[in-house]
């Protein structure tokens, strides 16, 4: 029998326009995204209400386009524009229209209020569908470093900037002297003394701006570290009064307001920072997320330029959506712990915080494997460190705290590995906060889609 092949004809035009719904499966995520956008109040969208100029793309389509693209791993406006031509699901979502990359970027940049309200609305819908528990919830909070849209090679250190300014001053003085000397040798063709002086003066102004910002950051850092320094001094004095012996170890060193020669400023994105990552030191932002432990939905988050999490506990709790209700317990690692942070978070009826007060070795000793009763509760008036150590040493506390790493860390893994979001594509702290909200919104919608799919499979 002769071999038979399916006929593939690229030349005969279609006699009737195709219905794109026939090309997108009924259970495709694009349908879920479009249905989710219908539940969002779009009145806050920035549109031209005068009716002048060219026709505008509907906010519902543009928002759905951004959510779907971020949920499926496409983040730049040029690549999203390309999808409207090449991706069948996106052609269906956009109604076979093709917004250009500038329109996509402008819509994303100008609709902060819409994107934030969409984040809260989707969580409200998750609560109505009983996916998200409301009230007295437990959240796991952590941060992850995400690359900034800037190269670390576009940065200058404080020590290098000071040296370059001195060099530029000397060169400008030399050029001025050359201009006054009638017998001096001329410059190369195409170069002039006034232009060379202007170029160096412009560079000098940029370096002055960089050093001013670095020095202001150092002063702010000193103010923050002073609080921790004073707390350490008070703890040492308290221990000395209680034991009658001088505390072991070196006394804490007071922070200095002067910048380190290695403190840096980035000219491409001045608000980003050099931060330590798994791959060394990179130009980054610190993205925070609060994840509800049962649904694994992100209920809050923000982006900071601080390289560590010491000051992020209270802002992270404050960022949690009102739709999640009251926070019962917050789970954080030792990077968030300080007496001031825990006291501030729990004051005024705030959530109970469970935090490791120091690094713990992996694995358990033989003693820890043995069954034993919970330790007695600390006396009234005990320090925060003693109370926290007791909370995390009880059976209930250990079980609850164990949920932290299995909740928030997999979420960061999904965002970075499954979605592929490893770098911000906007610049400046305000704009990267906007983009992080869009990432969290896209993650939640994709998470809800998979929960619905698993429920339907279980019923079938």
Image (cartoon, grey):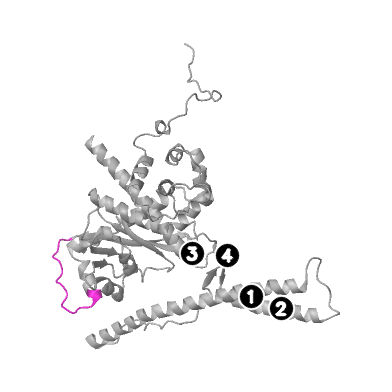
Q: Which residue is label 1 attached to?
A: 204
Q: Secondary structure at mark 3?
A: loop
Name the quadrant of the C terminus. top left
Q: Which circle's residue, 2 or 3, is located before the other in the chain?
A: 2
Identify which residue, 181 or 45, lies in the foreground: 45
Quarter of the image holding residue 25? top left
Disc 4 versus disc 1: distance between alpha carbons?
A: 16 Å
Label 3 crowd bin: few (<14), some (14–19), many (20+), radius 10 Å: some
Mark closest to the chain's N terminus, 2 or 4:
4
> As displayed, is residue 403 above or below residue 447?
below
- Marks 2/4 in contact by CB < 8 Å: the verdict is no
Relative depth, front residue between 316 and 420: 316
Compared across the picture, whether 21 is left or right of 318 comes to right
Can residue 403 be seen in the rendering of this structure?
A: no
Query: Which residue was labeled with disc 2?
Result: 172
Q: x, y (%) of residue 66? A: 43, 49
Task: Magenta stretch: give its range.
Answer: 370-386
The residue pinned by badge 4 equals 154
| Residue 24 belongs to the span the image colors magenta | no
Pick the front one: 138 or 80: 80
* Magenta span dominant secondary structure: loop
**Disc 2 to disc 1: CB gap under 8 Å:** yes
Residues at marks 2 and 3, CA–CA distance in whole angstroms:
33 Å
Counting from the top left corner in percent of width and height, residue 320 is at: 30, 62
Between tags 4 and 3, which lies in front?
Answer: 3
| 384 falls in the magenta region | yes
Earlier-in-chain disc, 1 versus 3: 1
């Amino acid at each position: 029998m002769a071999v038979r092949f399916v006929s593939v004809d690229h030349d005969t035009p279609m006699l009737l326009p195709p219905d794109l719904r026939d090309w997108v499966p009924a259970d495709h995520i694009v349908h879920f995204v479009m249905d989710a956008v219908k539940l969002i109040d779009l009145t806050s969208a920035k549109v031209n209400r005068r009716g002048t100029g060219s026709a505008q793309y509907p906010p519902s389509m543009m928002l759905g386009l951004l959510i779907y693209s971020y949920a499926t791993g496409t983040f730049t406006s040029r690549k999203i524009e390309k999808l409207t031509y090449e991706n069948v699901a996106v052609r269906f979502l956009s109604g076979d229209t093709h917004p250009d990359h500038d329109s996509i970027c402008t819509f994303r940049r100008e609709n902060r209020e819409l994107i934030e309200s969409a984040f809260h609305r989707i969580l409200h819908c998750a609560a109505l569908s009983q996916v998200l528990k409301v009230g007295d919830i437990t959240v796991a909070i952590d941060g992850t470093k995400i690359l900034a849209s800037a190269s670390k090679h576009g940065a200058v250190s404080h020590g290098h900037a000071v040296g370059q300014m001195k060099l530029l001053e000397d060169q400008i003085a030399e050029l001025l002297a050359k201009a006054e000397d009638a017998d001096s040798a001329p410059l190369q063709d195409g170069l002039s003394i006034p232009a060379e002086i202007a170029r160096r003066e412009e560079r000098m102004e940029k370096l002055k701006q960089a050093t001013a910002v670095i020095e202001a950051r150092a002063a702010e850092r000193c103010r923050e570290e002073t609080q921790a320094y004073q707390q350490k001094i008070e703890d040492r004095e308290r221990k000395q009064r209680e034991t009658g012996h001088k505390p072991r170890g070196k006394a804490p060193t007071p922070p200095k307001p002067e910048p380190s020669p290695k403190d840096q400023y980035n000219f491409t994105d001045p608000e980003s920072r050099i931060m330590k990552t798994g791959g060394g030191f990179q130009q980054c932002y610190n993205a925070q997320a609060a994840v509800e432990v049962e649904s694994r939905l992100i209920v809050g988050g923000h982006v900071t330029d601080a390289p560590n999490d010491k000051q992020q506990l209270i802002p992270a709790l404050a960022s949690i959506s009102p739709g999640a209700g009251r926070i019962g317990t917050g789970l954080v690692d030792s990077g968030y712990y300080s007496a001031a942070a825990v006291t501030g978070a729990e004051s005024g009826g705030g959530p109970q915080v469970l935090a490791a007060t120091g690094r713990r070795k992996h694995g358990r000793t033989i003693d820890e494997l043995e069954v034993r009763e919970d330790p007695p509760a600390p006396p009234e008036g005990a320090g925060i460190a003693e109370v926290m150590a007791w909370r995390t040493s009880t059976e209930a506390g250990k079980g609850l705290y164990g949920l932290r790493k299995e909740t928030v860390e997999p979420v960061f893994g999904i965002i970075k590995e499954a979605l592929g979001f490893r770098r911000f594509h906007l610049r400046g702290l305000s704009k990267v906060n906007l983009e992080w909200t869009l990432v969290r919104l896209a993650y939640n919608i994709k998470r809800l889609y998979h929960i619905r799919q698993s429920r339907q499979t279980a019923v079938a």
